[in-house]
Amino acid sequence: MIIEMKARGDPIDMVLMADHGSERPETDDFVPLFRAWMDNHGIPNEVVRYEPKRFKHWPPYYSLLENLLTNGTLPSISFGRHSCSQKWKIAPQDRWTEAWQPALSAWARGQKVVKLIGYDCSPADNRRYAEREGHVDLRYEFRCPLRDWGWDRDACIARIRAEGLPIPVKSSCFFCAAMKPHEVRTLPALYLRLIVLIEARAAPRLRTVDGLWRKPIKGRGAGEARPGSMTEFIRAEHLLDPEEVDRIIAEAPGDLLAFQQAAARVALEHREPIGDWIARFNAGLDLRC
C-alpha cells in the first residue's frame, strides 16, 4: 500500500509502527529495511510503544512477552479475545497521534484524521474488513486503498517484489494463537523455549484452555491437526530436546517466581527488570543469580 501510494503521488503524512517487543524474528529483520526505504523516499515514519507505568510490586516489564510472564497468563487471543492488540498496538498509535500537531489542527477545524488500513481483497482480509465495515469514529476516517484498487495478496507481493524489497512474512507475536503449525516449525529454538516458558508459567491458572492454541483441532478439511498446547506440539514434533522441555517446565516458573518475590522487597527504582531475567534464561545461565 505504502509503496504504490508513493508511486501514484498520493500523500502520506506519517507511517506508524507499533512495537510490542514480541514479533516474529522475520518481522524484526524487515522493519529496519522498510524504514530505510521510507526514509529514502521521504515518507515520515515513527515506531511507537506502549509504556507501562504502574508495576505495583512486580519487576518492570516493557514487552507483551514480559507482561505475560509477569502476570502468569496467556495472551487474550488464547481466551478468544483481542485486547492485546488494543493495548499494545492501537492505543500507542492513538496516543502518539493525540500529540501530533497536524492531527490537533485537523480536529480543531472539525475535520477527521484519515487512517489508511492495509486490508486487501484476498479472502482473509475480506473477512477482516467485513468485521469493521461501517465502523464510525468521531476522530478518524478509515480508508483501504488496496481494496479501492482491487488488489489481492498476490498483487501486493508482486508490487513489493518489483520494488526490489524482500517479501515480509505475516506479522504476529511469535506465540500468537493464530499461528499455524507450519509457522511454529519455522521458529528458532530460542523462541520455542520461550513458548514453553509462557505455557509453564501460566499453567497453574489455566482452567478453560489447554495452552496458547486453546483447544485441540482434529485437522478436518484444509486445517492441520494440532493440540491445544504449543508445548505439546513442540514436544511431539521434536522441535526441542524433550529433556530441555521438561527442565524448563520443572525449573523456570519457580525461578521466575523467586525473582519476582525478591523484586517485591526493594524500591521500584532498584528493581531489576524482568527482561534481565529473560536474558539469563535465553543464555542458559543460572536463573537463581
Image (spheres, helix red, strand yellow):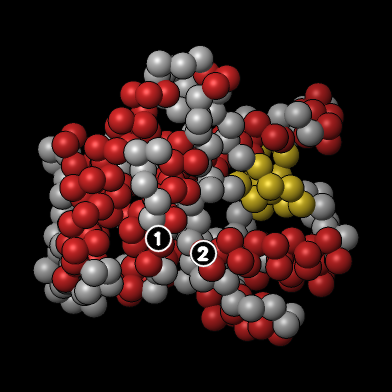
Q: Quadrant of residue 229?
A: bottom left
Element type at marker 2? helix
Q: Quadrant of residue 31?
A: bottom right
On the image, the x and y values in percent for residue 120 come to: 55, 66
The quadrant of the picture occupied by the N terminus is: bottom right
Does the image show residue 269? yes
Residue on which the image places disc 2: 25
Relative placement, left or right, of 230 versus 62 is left
Relative placement, left or right, of 13 versus 94 is right
Does the image show residue 147? no
Depth check, front residue: 100 or 193: 193
Depth check, front residue: 118 or 203: 203
Residue at horizontal 23 percent and vertical 77 percent from the top = 222
**Mark 2 residue type:** Pro
Tag count: 2
Residue at horizontal 21 percent and vertical 54 percent from the top = 247
Q: Looking at the rendered structure, which numbered label has been put on residue 191?
A: 1
Q: Earlier in the sequence, mark 1 or mark 2?
A: 2
On the image, the x and y values in percent for residue 283 come to: 44, 56
On the image, the x and y values in percent for residue 49 come to: 61, 40
